[in-house]
Image (cartoon, rainbow, N blue to C red):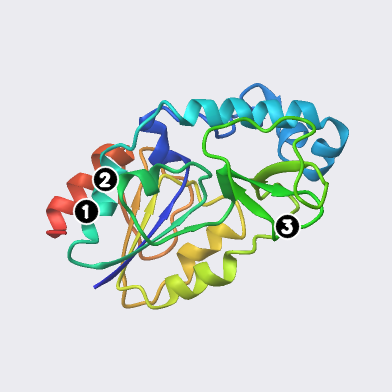
Amino acid sequence: MKIVALTGAGISAPSGVKTFRDAGGLWENHRVEDVATPEGFARNPELVLRFYNERRAQLAVVKPNAAHLALAAWERAHEVGVITQNVDDLHERAGSTRIIHLHGQLTKARCTLDPSYVVDIGYRPIALGDRSPAGAQLRPHIVWFSEAVPAMDDAELEMEDADAVFVIGTSLQVYPAAGLAEIAPSRALRFLVDPHPGRVPPGYRVIAQSADLGVPALSAELGL
């Protein structure tokens, strides 16, 4: 069976990752326009680098939770693909091996002039003045608002032949990622795990629990 999991901030929240926006549109007390747009980086690169350095330092001390571990365990018996809107590395650390990061990865940096130059930095900070071999400033390897989502084509292909789809911890409000839930084959089993589900696409069974509780419970119920 081919399983595809579409994951959002809610799968990492039980681990203590707090990188999602609050109801006021703020992201860790910053306006999204200031820390998650190319224009914000152009205006104040030092602020943006500090913001992501703090997120990266936070990531270094959290751990995968039961939901991440359950998805990784499914690989023992099934073909499993993870499409994540998250920029953390908790799926990797849990043991999942087939992961598409729609919005980039916090543990990588890239050249501001050449997007193809991407380097692993782990949990280290990026400083103003850190440059690529081309001599350009390094920036977080994050897909900011208004930027293209290069991994969307791969994500759509992953979803198109799924036998079961699990939407976990995402409000399905951010496009184009939200549209992926709707292109699952009609024959596929479809589940949405979220304690406060927002938009529920047709055909999805809702499990109104946090990811760390709902995913293992559903795994046990389905015999995965």
User: What is the crowding at mark 3: few (fewer than 14 residues within 10 Å), some, or many (at least 20)?
Assistant: few
Which label belongs to residue 73?
A: 1
Give the image location of residue 111, x and y in percent: 74, 50
User: What is the crowding at mark 2: few (fewer than 14 residues within 10 Å), some, or many (at least 20)?
Assistant: many
Going by the image, does 115 lie left or right of 108?
Answer: right
Residue that mark 3 sits on: 115
Residue that mark 2 sits on: 69
Placement of 136 over or under 147, stated as above or below:
above
Q: Amino acid at mark 3?
A: Pro
Give the image location of residue 71, x and y in percent: 28, 53
The reply to whether callout 1 and callout 3 are in contact (CB within 8 Å) is no
Going by the image, does 31 lie left or right of 201?
Answer: right
User: What is the crowding at mark 1: few (fewer than 14 residues within 10 Å), some, or many (at least 20)?
Assistant: some
- Marks 1 and 2, how far apart at CA: 6 Å
Give the image location of residue 151, x and y in percent: 58, 64
Placement of 158 over or under 98, stated as above or below:
below
